[in-house]
Image (tube, rainbow, N blue to C red):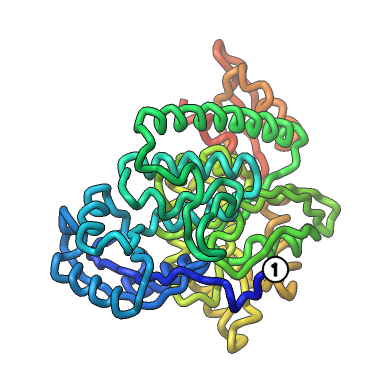
Amino acid sequence: MKIPQNTIHRERAFLVGVDLQKDEDLLSIDDSLEELALLADSSGLEVVGRITQRLRAPNPKTFIGLGKVDEVKALVEEVQADIVVFDEELSGRHLRELEKILGDRIRIIDRTALILDIFALHANTREGALQVELAQYEYRLPRLTKAWTHLARQAGGGAGRSGSTGGVGLRGPGETQLEVDRRDIRRRIGNLKDQLEKVRTHRQQYRSRRKRSNLPIVALVGYTNAGKSTLLNHLSGADIYVADQLCATLDPTTRRVDFPGGQIALFTDTVGFIQKLPTTLVAAFRATLEEIAEADLLLHVVDVTHMNAQSQAKAVYQTLEDIDADHIPVLIALNKIDLLNDADGARKALEYFPNSVAISALTGEGIDDLLKSVNGILFEKFVDVSLWLPYKEGALISLFHEQGHVEMVEHVDDGIQITGVIPNRLLARYSPYMAQNK
């Protein structure tokens, strides 16, 4: 029997934000805490209170100051919260000391654990489930405290939940994690890495087949909830799951898109990025993120209506740099212009984001202009190059002859020197072989 939405119990969460006054922070403490509240809601929590503190450095025992811990304890009791969520990553020692002070009834997690929980909720394929489980184990290994039972949702999205019908319960790799031996955890991590390496090999073979088809590949990237899945649905006529939630799309989806002039390209929707994306998650999702790193063009979808659109864009570029995809050409799609209050809003946004097109993935406004821009980059723009290609890269040599225009070829002992023009979309593939890199 389906439970009416208004009767579902949601665990009550109290949020703790810390301003460490770091230059690399992209969002203000208030904006970051607001995003944490949205993450909590996506995980099924009900936010009932929040508090912030400015610190030059974290307290080595409790992260926040001891006086602030006492204040948190009093407020948590006042609002009857079940769980305390920190906006920064906590160490095992932080968790243990905080649990001693706040008591056994209150569970403590951090932003990383919350993001991992949301990803577990949306892991609908075996590959996604393996990646999330690996990230969860690597995160929890140095934190074998009561916190292990907080967010251990079983891979596949919600199975293994005990207790209430909503919120964050006992989910995942096991429900008696404190008794799990570290040796068994490391063994499981090793097994997961072996399985994911097979997945990575399979994905690489799949990408190789796609490259042999010579169809250009466009990867949709962007901050979480920017509208990437909605855009791919509109472009391809697909029916990809869309939700007004953070991190709703996890598994990559590739669809064919036909251009008005008859050209064809493959568009891949990928996981949405977010500020402070856990390093364990980036590492675990290496096979998936390689879909981005090997694309011919990145279509960066930006929610132009968001007050922190520029900071979110910076977070995306930081992640692209982390996965070695910052060399690929980028076209920006300023999405959700249908929600702007005035017509000048989109024009003003274009000034802040060069090489961009204003669109609405929901209504279709601006989509024709977007396709023209993508078509121009993929099929019309050519660049001059001078390359040294080793003979073992026969596929790239053939591709140059097929897709570009050869002006000069010189055979040398270990490869060929080749000069000419190639489509701009292929530049990333040839960048390691530029003549100056030899």
Q: Say above or below: 35 vs 213.
A: below
Q: Quadrant of residue 233?
A: bottom right
Give the residue at mark 1.
2
Q: Say above or below: 173 vs 76.
A: above
Could you say where residue 424 lies in the image, as x and y percent from the top left? 63, 46
Q: Residue furthest right?
A: 262
Q: Is residue 44 left or right of residue 398?
A: left
Q: Secondary structure at mark 1?
A: loop
Quadrant where the image shows the N terminus: bottom right
Could you say where residue 77 lies in the image, as x and y percent from the top left? 29, 75
Report the number of discs: 1
Q: Residue furthest bottom?
A: 342
Judge whether residue 427 can be spotted in this image: no
Which residue occupies 29% across, 54% down?
90
Which residue occupies 64% across, 34% down?
203
Which kind of residue does numbered mark 1 sit on?
Lys
Could you say where residue 19 lies in the image, as x and y percent from the top left? 25, 67
Q: Is residue 252 left or right of residue 403?
A: left
User: Depth check: 8 or 68 in front?
Assistant: 8
Which residue occupies 31% across, 41% down?
142
Q: Quadrant of residue 295?
A: top right
Q: Residue furthest top?
A: 413
